[in-house]
Amino acid sequence: MSNSASQFAFAPLGPTHLIASANPAPTPVQIRVRSGESTFGQYRVVNNSSFTCFLGVGGTAAQATARAAAIVAGTPAETIVLVPGAVEVLRLQPDGFFTSFSANPADVYITPGQGL
């Protein structure tokens, strides 16, 4: 049995951030997992709306902005699609920038932490 930290229940390691998903995507915010606690980042992401959101994540604000876009059929993209009401725990870089695009205003909550 593995006792890797990623196998434990999700534990918050920082404050929850609200991203007001919109068209165009808002200015990206950097969300860090507390340093010294983890060498990687896990984030609990909640799409608290009835609209699909396209989460952009990157090592820089410019990367996050470029990735926060609706996906076009036949053209793969580095966008994370959040269906309405989605609650996801994602393993990402520990100090990434986040923003979100949606056709209608929507609230996306992101909590840095560790675990599933």
Image: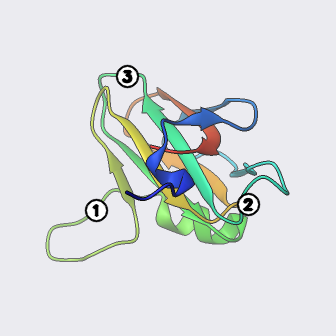
Determine whether 53 is above or below 3 in the image. Answer: above
Furthest toward the bottom, the residue is 75
Disc 3 or disc 1, which is closer to the eye? 3
Q: In this rendering, would 70 be left or right of 46?
A: left
Q: Earlier in the sequence, mark 2 or mark 1?
A: 1
**Foreground of the two, 111 or 20:** 111
Q: Quadrant of residue 58?
A: bottom right
In this picture the colour scheme is rainbow
Q: In this rendering, would 61 be left or right of 63?
A: right
Disc 3 target residue: 49
Q: Crowdedness of circle 3 by 10 Å Cα count: few (<14), some, many (20+)?
A: some
Q: Quadrant of residue 106?
A: top left
Q: Which quadrant is the N terminus positioned in?
A: bottom left
Q: Which quadrant is the C terminus positioned in?
A: top left
| Callout 2 secondary element | loop
Disc 1 target residue: 71
- Coordinates of residue 36 in the picture (x, y in percent): 85, 57
Task: Specify the amino acid type for callout 1.
Answer: Ile
Q: Earlier in the sequence, mark 2 or mark 3?
A: 3
How far separated are the C-alphas under marks 2 and 3? Answer: 25 Å
Q: Quadrant of residue 96?
A: bottom right
Determine whether 32 is above or below 95 in the image. Answer: above
| Callout 3 secondary element | loop
Q: Which residue appears at 39% of the width and 41% of the height?
A: 88
- Coordinates of residue 40 in the picture (x, y in percent): 64, 63
**Foreground of the two, 32 or 69:** 32
Q: Earlier in the sequence, mark 3 or mark 1?
A: 3
